[in-house]
Image (cartoon, rainbow, N blue to C red):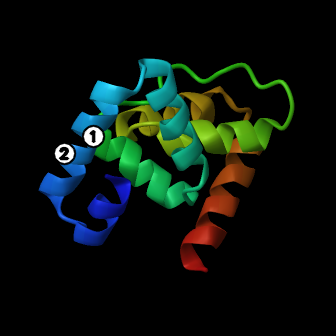
């Protein structure tokens, strides 16, 4: 069925493939496949997919290893509303010097 969906590449064929997955696989199996597929996507595409699904990332997980990488993963899954809310809250929580540095960094990236 996957081969057929890839060859046809039509919305109704992909919907049929999703129905087959639902009928034949357990939730855990489908979740594993979804996670593995999401891990292969570039961050900007992952963000588009998560936005299209209409679900946000929820509360960010506690970072245990690489804080920036875990923030990237969360941000890729977050909705636009979540991104704005956390950005504004984090920005207002920063000290004055850090806010200035953040704005300088953002301005450099915007003009690059």
Q: Is residue 87 above or below residue 63?
A: below
Between 78 and 26, the residue placed more toward the observer is 26
Find the residue positioned furthest to the bottom: 112
Q: Is residue 26 above or below residue 82?
A: above
Q: Which mark is residue 41?
A: none
Image quarter for residue 110?
A: bottom right
Between 69 and 25, the residue placed more toward the observer is 25
Q: Which residue corresponds to mark 1?
A: 18
Q: Which residue corresponds to mark 2?
A: 16
Mark 1 lies on a secondary structure that is helix
* Residue 109 placement, left or right of 82: right
Q: Position of residue 100 (x, y in %)?
A: 70, 50
Q: Position of residue 22 (x, y in %)?
A: 30, 28
Q: CA distance from mark 2 to mark 1?
A: 5 Å
Q: Are marks 2 and 1 in contact (CB under 8 Å)?
A: yes
- Total count of labels: 2
Neighbor class of circle 1 (other Cα within 10 Å; few <14, some 14-19, many 20+) is some
Neighbor class of circle 2 (other Cα within 10 Å; few <14, some 14-19, many 20+) is some
Mark 2 lies on a secondary structure that is helix
Q: Position of residue 98 (x, y in %)?
A: 76, 42
Q: Residue at x 50, y 34 (%)?
A: 88
Q: Residue at x 55, y 41 (%)?
A: 75
Q: Residue at x 22, y 35 (%)?
A: 19
Q: Position of residue 40 (x, y in %)?
A: 59, 55
Q: Residue at x 19, y 46 (%)?
A: 15
Image quarter for residue 26?
A: top left
């Amino acid at each position: 069925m996957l081969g057929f969906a890839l060859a046809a590449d039509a919305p109704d064929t992909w919907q049929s493939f999703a129905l087959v997955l639902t009928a034949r696989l357990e939730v855990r199996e489908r979740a594993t496949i979804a996670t593995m597929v999401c891990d292969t996507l570039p961050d900007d595409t992952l963000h588009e997919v998560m936005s299209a699904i209409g679900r946000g990332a929820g509360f960010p997980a506690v970072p245990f290893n690489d804080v920036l990488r875990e923030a990237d993963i969360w941000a890729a899954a977050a909705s636009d509303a979540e991104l704005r809310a956390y950005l504004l809250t984090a920005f207002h929580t920063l000290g004055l010097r850090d806010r200035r540095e953040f704005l300088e960094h953002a301005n450099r990236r915007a003009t690059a």
